[in-house]
Image (cartoon, rainbow, N blue to C red):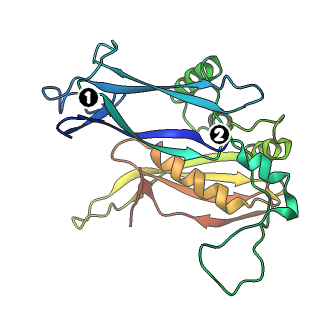
Amino acid sequence: QNGMEVYSVDQVTGVDPISGRTTEYQPFYSFRHGARFEQQQTFWYATRRPSLQPADRGTEVHLSLVDLGFDPRLPAESTLLVRTTCTNRELPLILQKAGERLAFELEAAAPLARIRCLRSPSPPQRPPLRRGLYWRLLSHLCLNHLSVSHGVEGRDALQEILRLYDFSDPELDKRAALVTQHLIDGITSLTSRAVVARPPTSDGSFCRGTEITIEFDEEKYIGTGTFLFACALERFLGLYTSINSFTQLVATTTKSATPFRTWLPRAGEHPLI
């Protein structure tokens, strides 16, 4: 338990101990209720709660089976197979204290003299639970109606959206919290203009989109790099676009008006090539 924490529940399967027949249950909060409604009316639902162990910052995941009315439901199968993705819980914090004494072992022989970490393992980052999560959700829903392409207001809206997903804990790792704060504060301006590009079709048509120019303060990205953060924003802005449109990110810095990168137009997860 000290070295494992459930990150996500990926699959829940019921097994009949007599016939061996298996039934895969779908998550309650999914889009597959109608597809298999006649065959299955049992769904799984997971809740995450703080650990009851003293001095444990980790969480525990509790799994329940419910029907479409969210009432508890006991299936005929008495055995559940649960596939999860797990993290190392608080183990990275223990490894941080090892320093140079942290040793690695190879599964097979290799001509290596030594293996060492260039950096210490980073502490786990966990999202807030219950009330700490509710206000973030409400803030996100409100900010989703704001345009990120309106000058100063657009910059402020983008920064606030990014802060909603900053789960760093200054008490646990002050340096990591400071780094993420600099990443967000390093966005100095955001402007946009309407542009036209050709979608990846052969009919010769064009579609309208938005070119977004973001200016970064390089002094805020010493040790982290502006380019990687800009790549993440380019993906995010692509998902923020409306149907039959696209976004194109242009990244500049306060020290140079010449863009250091202009990305291809993007609609959702797909670049327009």
Q: Which residue: 33% across, 60% down?
A: 199
State the quadrant of the C terminus.
bottom left
The answer to whether residue 7 shows anywhere in this view is yes
Q: Give the residue at x 56% y 20%.
A: 138
Res. 15 image quadrant: top left
Depth check, front residue: 131 or 123: 123
Horizontally, residue 99 falls left or right of residue 3, namely right
Secondary structure, mark 1, is loop
* Tag nearer the camera, 1 or 2: 1
Which residue is more in the foreground, 111 or 127?
A: 111
Q: What residue is pinned by disc 1?
A: 77
Residue type beneath disc 1: Glu
Residue 202: x and y, percent? Answer: 23, 68
Q: Is residue 129 above or below residue 211?
A: above
- Residue 28 visible (yes or no): no
Looking at the image, is 26 positioned above or below residue 96?
above
Q: Quadrant of residue 203?
A: bottom left
Q: Which residue is mark 2?
A: 151
List x then y, in percent, for residue 142: 55, 23
What type is the residue that disc 2 sits on?
Answer: Gly
Distance from label 1 to label 2 (Cα)? 58 Å
- Confirm or deny contact between disc 1 and disc 2 (CB under 8 A): no
Label 1: how many residues lie within 10 Å, few (<14), some (14-19) or many (20+)? some
